[in-house]
Amino acid sequence: GAGVSQSPSNKVTEKGKDVELRCDPISGHTALYWYRQSLGQGLEFLIYFQGNSAPDKSGLPSDRFSAERTGGSVSTLTIQRTQQEDSAVYLCASSLGSTDRYNEQFFGPGTRLTVL
Amino acid sequence: GDSVTQMEGPVTLSEEAFLTINCTYTATGYPSLFWYVQYPGEGLQLLLKATKADDKGSNKGFEATYRKETTSFHLEKGSVQVSDSAVYFCALRRTGFQKLVFGTGTRLLVSP
């Protein structure tokens, strides 16, 4: 079956512009995660959605970052007024659920964001 | 806070050599531990995991044992192949939490 998909695969933008990154999780997965992979910081957690519960936003680095998940499926990560330090690969993952038996995270291929 | 430390790479080996990639962690309580692998051009994949002390995770010839006394989860393989060339990430997840905390990754290069 289809895995986690992300779009676009590459995004180049100018400093100060807003960007939207999209994630389509595996069908039936109720949990969705965003991570960021950058040279300076490694792989960092950004945000986690589980069903209809309030998301865990504890990893978002600033209020320029936000994410939503519509209809319990597709998620969009938005970065406003992009800065050069936002350049990174943004990874999305999903899991069947949040209990130990079902919380293996399956990752998408990522979106490479370059801010000029 | 929680953290994972892994050896810096790249690790360069010849085919059929023995592999060890060191990983140690700092965390509250008893986290679950993972090794993920990222092959060139592909997404992260779970390689193996262990959820409690002394558990051994294994997959595709790779093994790692959860050592609470040394807070370690070293990855080993007895005989590497060229196809094992990839970046390997050690990670933990604290009990009751969902986010993964990753190490910085170790690139493995295996030559024929």
Image: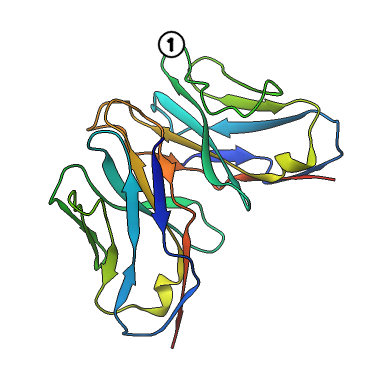
Q: Nearer the viewer, residue B75 or B5?
A: B5
User: From the viewer's perspective, is residue B92 above or below residue B20?
Assistant: above
Q: Is residue A1 visible?
A: no
Q: Amino acid at mark 1?
A: Asn
Asked if residue A81 lies left or right of residue A22, the reply is: right
Residue A29, compared with residue B87, is above or below; it is: above
Q: Residue at 43% of width from left, 88% of height from top?
A: B112
Q: Which residue is mark 1?
A: A52
Q: Residue furthest left?
A: B54
Q: Which color scheme is applied?
A: rainbow
Measured as percent of width and height from the top left, residue A39 is found at: 63, 53
Label 1: chain letter: A
Residue B25 shown left or right of residue A52 in the figure: left
Quadrant that contains the C terminus of chain A: top right
Question: What residue is shown at x 27% (from left), y 72% (from top)?
Answer: B77
Looking at the image, residue A106 sits to the left or right of residue A69; the answer is left
Residue B80 appears in which quarter of the rendering?
bottom left
The location of residue B48, given as percent across then percent down, is 28, 53
Residue B21 horizontal/vertical position (percent): 35, 67
Task: Give neighbour class at mark 1: few <14, some 14-19, many 20+ (Cα, 10 Å).
Answer: few
Would you identify the image quadrant in which residue B93 lies?
top left
Residue A22 seen in render: yes
Q: Percent from the top left, x then y, of residue A68?
A: 59, 19
Q: Is residue B42 above or below residue B17?
A: above
Helix, strand or loop at label 1? It is loop
Quadrant assignment for the N terminus of chain A: top left
Q: Nearer the viewer, residue A30 or A114?
A: A114
Instruction: Name the residue: 59% across, 27% down.
Output: A60
Circle count: 1
